[in-house]
Amino acid sequence: MKKITLRLKRKEGTEDLPLPRYMSNGSSGMDLYADVAEKAVIKPNEVKLISAGIYIALPAGYEAQIRPRSGLALKHGITVLNTPGTIDSDYRGLISVILINAGGEEYTVNRGDRIAQMVIKEVLQADLMVVKDLCETERSGGGFGHTGV
């Protein structure tokens, strides 16, 4: 598995929180932990921005994707609203997660709860070339539902 060095700075006052970490050798995402004063209650259909208490410096050519934790989504309806959230390599601000409660009951986020996962990905930038026509394919302009269900 390819590895990179990710520079990370803790937000002041978060020394009690675990650093993001992979929960198994095969994990592609590092769990992020909630940096809330004590707790944050998310009501059904409510959106809340929850700090992860860290800043990162990604190398050029990489991004961090913020994704939901499947257990929170299945058991409580808690997911990342703009999934995957993208952190660009030139961003140096506080990492926070936009959570939404799609479930039917209030959900409490406690300090140090695992709230999302962060996946580091290589990225490419495209040079655009304007052309008069595009090559045809078997699918061509077939869009949503073009294969049936």
Image (cartoon, grey):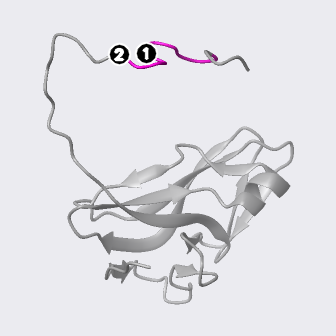
Depth check: give the residue in front, 77 or 42. 77
Near mark 2 (Cα within 10 A), the count class, few <14, some 14-19 or many ≥20, is: few
User: Contact, CB < 8 Å: mark 1 with mark 2?
Assistant: yes
- In the image, residue 41 sits, relative to residue 60, either above or below, namely above
Name the image quarter holding residue 145: top right
Screen quadrant of the N terminus = bottom left
Per the model, the C-alpha gap separating discs 1 and 2 is 6 Å
Give the residue at mark 1. Answer: 140
Name the image quarter holding residue 39: bottom right
Tag 1 secondary structure:
loop
**In the rendered structure, does residue 135 fall within the stretch colored magenta?**
no
Of the numbered discs in the image, which one, if any, rests on residue 79? none
Residue 95, given in percent of the width and then of the height, sits at 42, 64
Give the residue at mark 2. Answer: 136
The residue that appears at 31% across and 82% down in the rendered structure is 5
Tag 2 secondary structure:
loop
The residue that appears at 37% across and 80% down in the rendered structure is 3
Depth check: give the residue in front, 84 or 129. 129
Question: The disc labelled 1 sits on which kind of residue?
Answer: Ser
Residue 9, given in percent of the width and then of the height, sits at 34, 81
- In the image, residue 116 sits, relative to residue 44, either above or below, namely below
Question: The disc labelled 2 sits on which kind of residue?
Answer: Glu
Q: Which residues are magenta?
A: 137-145
Residue 44, given in percent of the width and then of the height, sits at 78, 42
Residue 148, given in percent of the width and then of the height, sits at 70, 17
Depth check: give the residue in front, 34 or 41. 34
Name the image quarter holding residue 147: top right
The residue that appears at 60% across and 72% down in the rendered structure is 37
